């Protein structure tokens, strides 16, 4: 991961991330259809939401093993249901994490810095919501701060929160950009994701090595083609 190098807007003391609303009606109109602030600012699953028990989840894995023709009682598979559920707890922990909280720590000692900040090559792994198979790749994120900047590791953590949910690459791209735009209120955000999808490379058409690119631009990146070009040039420049 390469780093190439705002206080949060004032909020009510009792405001909650899930209560956040666009500060400008134009922002809501510019969001992809169906992308509500509550979707990307709060944890996706509340602690009080009814969920199956761990035993029920393990029983479901047991059923799937039977379905594919395996014997769940043989030695190598006895502990597989438990292992699968434990793996799911790790792979999908993003449902229980709050994106807004990751971006709540900012720094003001920027010496008047007014150019964009770019972090490229953020590696991630997510799961396709259509087949529940992995897709993996790199995210490149830039934003132009207003007075304050967010800790560099926070953008990588933000990417992981959204990636550790069932996703499409398009939705993942839009969520990352929208969260940064909503919480930090920068002058612009640029997000590009490049990823390989195993639902395409190891099944179906089985085209190994095919890479999907998605991008999302807001503010100055959307309105200024020169800034888009500069972002893309820096993303594609060779590593030193």
Image (cartoon, rainbow, N blue to C red):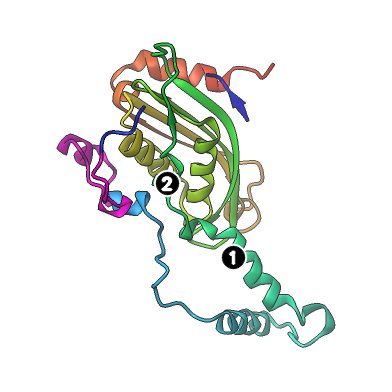
Residue indicated by mark 2: 101
Can I make out residue 35 in this image?
A: no
Q: Nearer the viewer, residue 78 or 8?
A: 8
Residue 47 falls left or right of residue 27: right
- Please determine whether, in this image, residue 45 is positioned above or below residue 174: below
Q: Quadrant of the image for the N terminus?
A: top right
Secondary structure mostly seen in magenta is loop
Q: Nearer the viewer, residue 12 or 103?
A: 12
Q: Position of residue 127 (x, y in %)?
A: 55, 56
Rate crowding at label 2 as few (under 14), some (14 to 19) or many (20 or more) other CA atoms within 10 Å: some
Residue 33 falls left or right of residue 194: left
User: Residue most toward the right?
Assistant: 75
Q: Secondary structure at mark 1?
A: helix
Question: Which quarter of the figure has residue 68?
Answer: bottom right
Residue interval drawn in magenta = 11-36
Q: Nearer the viewer, residue 163 or 102?
A: 102
- Please name the residue shown 62% across and 79% down the image: 61
Mark 2 to mark 1 CA distance (whole Å): 20 Å
Question: Which quarter of the figure has residue 181?
Answer: top left
Q: Position of residue 27 (x, y in %)?
A: 22, 36
Residue indicated by mark 1: 89
């Amino acid at each position: 991961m390469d780093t190439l190098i705002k206080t949060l807007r004032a909020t009510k003391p009792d405001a909650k991330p899930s209560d956040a609303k666009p500060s400008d009606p134009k922002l809501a109109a510019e969001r992809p259809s169906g992308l509500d602030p509550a979707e990307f600012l709060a944890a996706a699953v509340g602690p009080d939401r009814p969920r199956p028990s761990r035993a029920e989840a393990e029983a479901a894995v047991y059923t799937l093993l039977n379905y594919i023709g395996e014997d769940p009682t043989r030695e190598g598979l006895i502990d597989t249901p438990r292992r699968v559920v434990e793996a799911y707890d790790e792979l999908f922990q993003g449902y229980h994490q709050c994106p807004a909280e990751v971006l709540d720590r900012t720094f003001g000692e920027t010496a008047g810095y007014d150019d964009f900040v770019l972090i490229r090559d953020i590696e991630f792994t997510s799961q396709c919501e259509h087949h529940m198979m992995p897709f993996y790749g790199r995210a490149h994120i830039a934003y132009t701060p207003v007075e304050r900047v967010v800790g560099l590791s926070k953008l990588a953590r933000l990417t992981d929160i959204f990636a550790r949910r069932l996703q499409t690459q398009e939705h993942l791209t839009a969520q990352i950009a929208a969260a940064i735009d909503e919480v930090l209120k920068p002058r612009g955000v640029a997000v590009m994701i490049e990823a390989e999808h195993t639902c395409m490379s190891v099944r179906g058409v089985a085209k190994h090595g095919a890479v999907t690119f998605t991008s999302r631009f807001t503010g100055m990146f959307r309105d200024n083609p020169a800034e888009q070009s500069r972002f893309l040039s820096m993303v594609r420049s060779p590593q030193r």
